[in-house]
Image (cartoon, helix red, strand yellow):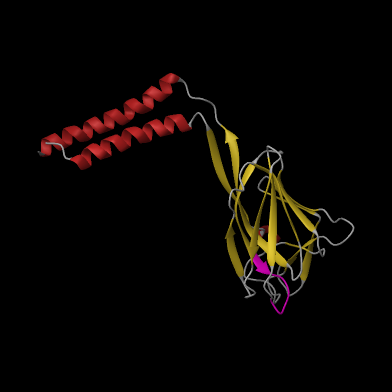
Amino acid sequence: MINSAFVKKLAVATLSATAIAIGMGTTAQALTVIDFESLAQPGDGTTDQGFSYTEDGYTLTNTNINQFPFATFNTGKSRYLGSTALYNNSIDGTTVLTRNDGGIFDLLSIDLGELNEPFESSTVTFVGTKADNSVISNSFNLNGVKGFQTFAFTDFTNLVSTSWQQIAPFHQFDNIVVSDITTKSVPETASVLGLLSFAALGAGSALKRKKAIA
């Protein structure tokens, strides 16, 4: 006799294969973490990083080209928070994140840390522009304690850009987690049937084993 748990596993296996086949014809997402570690420098100073920074197919732009560029704290600096982070060195300066190819993306999370000593709590507001030209915003509150906090975005999907400002008492940012959105081709019918047949074959083998044990 076949128990209900086995029947459930059989159904899950078949549905999983179906989901894979259907998913092959929709979209694929690849996570990327922009971590700035290539910018790490020893010593107790700061390093200017220019008005534009590119990593892993994404570009951060400091739009205040008549003021001060992006910068990082060297690893021996007291304001270095244990990981190399970028900050906009222009007061009220705007930072813009885009994909290099102009494509859409999801913004999942970011690490934010205080910039200046004594460390103070602050609020950072992110504004996302979506592919349909609609706009969304999320605001995050730093607790004023030295170190990074990770903040997760809500509904920051299908974006063409995200921007935020460097407002007093200022912040630095690290580990920007983004997800590329790329369209995949629809699989041929034979490929779908092949996946389903494979699932059925595996389930059939399991069924035979169950009967043999019984």
Residue 80 relative to residue 194: left or right: right
Placement of 62 over or under 172, stated as above or below:
above
Q: Is residue 113 magenta?
A: yes
Question: x and y percent of residue 186 in the render?
Answer: 51, 25
Q: Residue furthest left?
A: 214
Q: Residue at x 32, y 25 (%)?
A: 197
Q: Residue furthest right?
A: 66
Question: x and y percent of residue 105 in the render?
Answer: 63, 43
Residue 180 relative to residue 41: left or right: left
Say if residue 157 shows up in the picture: yes
Say if residue 40 shows up in the picture: no
Placement of 17 over or under 113, stated as above or below:
above
Location of residue 206 by image quarter = top left
Q: Residue furthest bottom?
A: 118
Placement of 136 over or under 48, stated as above or below:
above
- Of residue 104 and residue 52, the one placed in the foreground of this image is 104
- Of residue 49 and residue 183, the one placed in the foreground of this image is 183
Question: x and y percent of residue 53 in the render?
Answer: 75, 53
| Quarter of the rendering occupied by the C terminus | top left
- Of residue 19 and residue 39, the one placed in the foreground of this image is 19
Q: Residue at x 27, y 39 (%)?
A: 9
| Quarter of the rendering occupied by the N terminus | top left
Q: Which residues are magenta?
A: 112-119
For the stretch drawn in magenta, the main secondary structure is loop
Q: Is residue 4 magenta?
A: no
Q: How many marks?
A: 0
Question: x and y percent of residue 44 in the render?
Answer: 73, 75
Residue 152 relative to residue 192: left or right: right
Q: Residue at x 62, y 48 (%)?
A: 156
Location of residue 199 by image quarter = top left
